[in-house]
Amino acid sequence: MMEEKDRRLYGELQLPFNHSYLHGRIYPPFIKQKHLDATRIFQLRSDDVLIATYPKNGTTWTQKIIQNLHKVHKTGHDLTRGDKVLLEVMPWLENTPHEIVDKMPGPRYLKTHNSYNLVAYNPNIPCKYVYIARNPKDVCVSLYHHCKGFAAFEYDGPFEEFADLFLKGTVESSDWWEHVKEFYQNTRDMDVFFMKYEDMHADGVSAIKKLNDFCSLPPMTDEMATEVLQLSAFKSMKADPKSNYSWLDDVRKKDQAPFMRKGTVGDWSNYFTPELAAKFDNKTREVFADIDLDFCDKL
């Protein structure tokens, strides 16, 4: 890594990675003002389901589960087509031309990383939002590898530096704690199904059945949910070229971890010192003091 005085800093925030800064939020550098403007006036449908997450919180896993729910139910939905990659059948709303999304058959399942106040929303259209929240320490580790892996960010700093940026809310999608809390409090009373990534790991069958019902799909037995869980296993996704984002390999650094790295709970313990873990837990307790949501654990 270059000496500190020689490092390139980007944008008005002078951060050590390339980015866009829009509406007080940090985005990947390829997200521009026109994309957000289009997203905020996006024409929703009543049967839309938005998978709304902070990056690296289990987005792809949730998308794959939903895809496999339709597969097991044999709905014949377009998202089960084997000739399309996951991002084509469940596009990222901030980074997909909306004329493409407008032509998709319903129900549409759309990915978004926008914050609560910037997410596509219309009080007169009762669409659904699936929100997944993951331990911020695991998110920090995963987002660190994500930032280092994609060439567009031009980042090559140490983990300790990135963890400090994460605590300050100066990473992609800004402050994790604020992002999670706003969706959890849901002051606009949107139809939000809030899941914890760790609960999905602990009892996948129960989580899948709840998600199935929220998406208004036919009743699901434990056996069917177990099949979905097996089809959506991380090992299967990582080996599946339609799901593992290998179609983006040409924009990733060859010497970094793949887009789908581990998908585990607790990998943070391989990176965090007790002191750093305490800083994260203290912020979690402080920000979530008035809500019943806990992500604190120990080395």
Image (cartoon, rainbow, N blue to C red):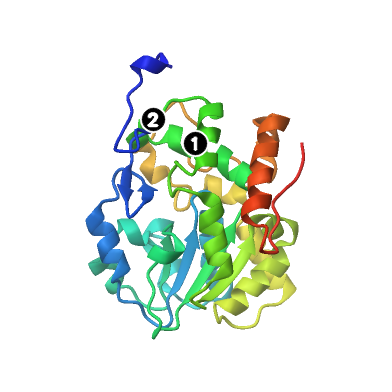
Q: Residue furthest top?
A: 3
Residue at 66% x, 65% y: name it.
Answer: 227
| Residue that carries the numbered disc 2 in the rendered image | 16
Assign the N terminus to one quadrant of the image. Answer: top left
x%, y% of residue 125? Answer: 40, 84
Label 2 Cα crowd, 10 Å radius (few <14 / some 14-19 / many 20+): many
Where is residue 180, by image quadrant?
bottom right
Task: Tell me the amino acid under the disc marked 1.
Answer: Leu
From what the image shows, is residue 75 above or below residue 207? below
x%, y% of residue 69? Answer: 57, 70
x%, y% of residue 48? Answer: 42, 76
Q: Can residue 258 be spotted in the picture?
A: no
Determine which of the numbered discs, if any, sits on residue 209 in the image.
none
Determine which of the numbered discs, if any, sits on residue 165 in the image.
1
Relative side of 50 to 289, left or right? left
Q: Secondary structure at mark 2?
A: loop
How far apart, in angstroms, are the residues tagged by discs 1 and 2? Answer: 10 Å
Where is residue 36, by image quadrant?
bottom left
Q: Residue furthest bottom?
A: 124
Label 1–label 2 contact, CB within 8 A: yes
Assign the C terminus to one quadrant of the image. Answer: top right
From what the image shows, is residue 224 above or below residue 253? below
Mark 1 or 2 closer to N-term?
A: 2
x%, y% of residue 112? Answer: 42, 60
Relative side of 28 to 291, left or right? left
Q: How many marks?
A: 2
Label 1 Cα crowd, 10 Å radius (few <14 / some 14-19 / many 20+): some
Residue at 51% x, 61% y: name it.
Answer: 63
Task: Tell me the amino acid under the disc marked 2.
Answer: Pro
